[in-house]
Image (tube, rainbow, N blue to C red):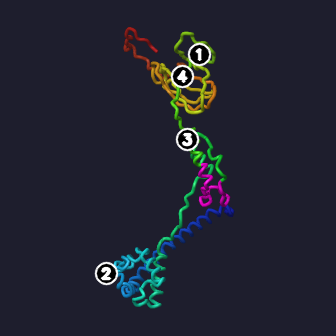
């Protein structure tokens, strides 16, 4: 008979958490039930006590025949309608407490009736959802601002380096209530916006120029010089053409290659664009005749080694698959074998 190991305090923690959440769920549910019960009680109290009091004390000025101040309390026919008119009761309570209702020329409310009416209005207002208060309009802190600019433009500009330090609340610099916008920060925002637009937008018309260069050829690991009058370079094994290109600015460039390939095997002909001897973009060559294929790459500024590599030469020896073994043929019966037709060979 084995003994059960006493659970550690860490093992008991999930059960404790489960108990806490269950308790919190019950508490929340009970609060909702209590709120519903309170609303029913307040509604019933209006039908039983308050409606008659309002009719006697208020209909003379705010009833079906006369609506002083555009207020008609006779339209509130039952408790449900009364709970839906909390704004009206808020105004009524202010007028009653201020001595404006009933007016001085009318018979005043008895102290008990006044207390009953105000107590009911207070209970009715308590059935409404609590006012959550104002909503903080928060701004981005300096790190968030840099991240947004980078995501929008693709450029890591860090424009908030010149911003004032963010205020800190409870050890955090992203608390909305402490992240104010003083005049100095607003001025820095405007300056940063101009700087970002200046670097992110190209306003002048770009100029293009053509540079001719003689690139070296690496064929199956050996360097060879192309013919001086050659316009094309062909590969049947691993190889590449290599040279240097000047990139005036860091950014995104479109590389166009005129290429064609004899398709063999199951894979299409694959070229690769290399920058700094690193493959940055594979290119499929699906057409047989030479056509332009293009690929977009990200390059840092400067003079950089560039290569266009042939990546997957077809090897017939690797592609050949041995035939599966076959069962030996049964010997032919005497006199049943037929001569082979002319031109046929046995394999």
Residues at discs 3 and 2 in contact (Cβ within 8 Å): no
Instruction: State the residue lying farthest toward the top.
Output: 342
Task: Give SS at disc 3.
Answer: helix
x and y, in percent, of residue 160 in the image: 63, 47
Residue ID at (41%, 75%): 85
The alpha-carbon separation of the residues under discs 2 and 1 comes to: 100 Å
Q: Which residue is mark 3?
A: 197
Q: Which residue is mark 4?
A: 209
The relative height of residue 31 versus residue 146 in the rendered view (above or below) is below
Say which label, 1 or 3, has the lower sequence index. Answer: 3
Residue 338 is a magenta residue: no
* Residue 3 in view: no
Task: Give SS at disc 1.
Answer: loop
Q: Which residue is mark 2?
A: 64
How many neighbours does mark 2 have within 10 angstroms: few (below 14), some (14-19), or many (20 or more)?
few
How many neighbours does mark 1 have within 10 angstroms: few (below 14), some (14-19), or many (20 or more)?
few
Say which label, 3 or 4, has the lower sequence index. Answer: 3
Q: Which mark is residue 214?
A: 1
The alpha-carbon separation of the residues under discs 2 and 4 comes to: 88 Å
How many neighbours does mark 4 have within 10 angstroms: few (below 14), some (14-19), or many (20 or more)?
few
Say which label, 2 or 1, has the lower sequence index. Answer: 2
Say which label, 3 or 2, has the lower sequence index. Answer: 2
Residue bounds of the magenta highlight: 166-188
Task: Give SS at disc 2.
Answer: loop
């Amino acid at each position: 008979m084995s003994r059960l190991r006493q659970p550690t305090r860490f093992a008991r923690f999930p059960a404790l958490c489960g108990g806490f959440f269950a308790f919190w769920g019950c508490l929340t549910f009970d609060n909702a039930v209590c709120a519903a019960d309170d609303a029913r009680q307040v509604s019933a109290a209006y039908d039983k006590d308050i409606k008659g009091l309002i009719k006697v004390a208020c209909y003379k000025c705010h009833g079906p025949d006369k609506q002083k101040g555009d207020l008609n309390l006779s339209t509130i026919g039952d408790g449900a309608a009364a709970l839906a008119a909390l704004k009206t009761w808020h105004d009524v309570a202010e007028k009653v407490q201020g001595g404006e209702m009933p007016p001085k020329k009318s018979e005043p409310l008895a102290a008990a009736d006044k207390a009953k009416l105000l107590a009911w209005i207070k209970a009715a207002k308590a059935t409404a959802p609590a006012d959550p208060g104002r909503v903080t309009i928060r701004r981005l802190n300096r790190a968030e601002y840099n991240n947004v600019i980078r995501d929008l433009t693709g450029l890591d500009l860090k424009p908030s380096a010149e911003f004032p330090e963010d205020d800190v609340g409870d050890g955090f610099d992203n608390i909305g209530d402490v992240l104010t916008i003083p005049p100095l920060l607003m001025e820095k925002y405007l300056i940063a916006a101009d700087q970002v637009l200046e670097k992110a937008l190209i306003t002048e018309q770009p100029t293009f120029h053509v540079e001719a260069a003689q690139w070296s050829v690496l064929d199956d690991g050996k360097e060879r010089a192309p013919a001086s009058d050659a316009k094309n370079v062909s590969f049947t094994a691993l190889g590449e053409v290599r040279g240097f290109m000047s990139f005036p600015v860091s950014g995104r460039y479109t590389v166009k290659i005129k290429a064609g390939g004899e398709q063999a095997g199951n894979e299409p002909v694959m070229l690769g664009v290399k920058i700094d001897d690193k493959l940055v973009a594979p290119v499929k060559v699906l057409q047989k005749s030479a056509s332009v294929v293009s690929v977009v790459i990200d390059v840092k500024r400067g003079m950089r080694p560039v290569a266009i590599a042939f990546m997957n030469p077809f090897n017939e020896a690797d592609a050949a698959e041995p035939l599966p073994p076959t069962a030996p043929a049964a010997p032919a019966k005497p006199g049943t074998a037929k001569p082979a037709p002319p031109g046929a060979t046995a394999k």
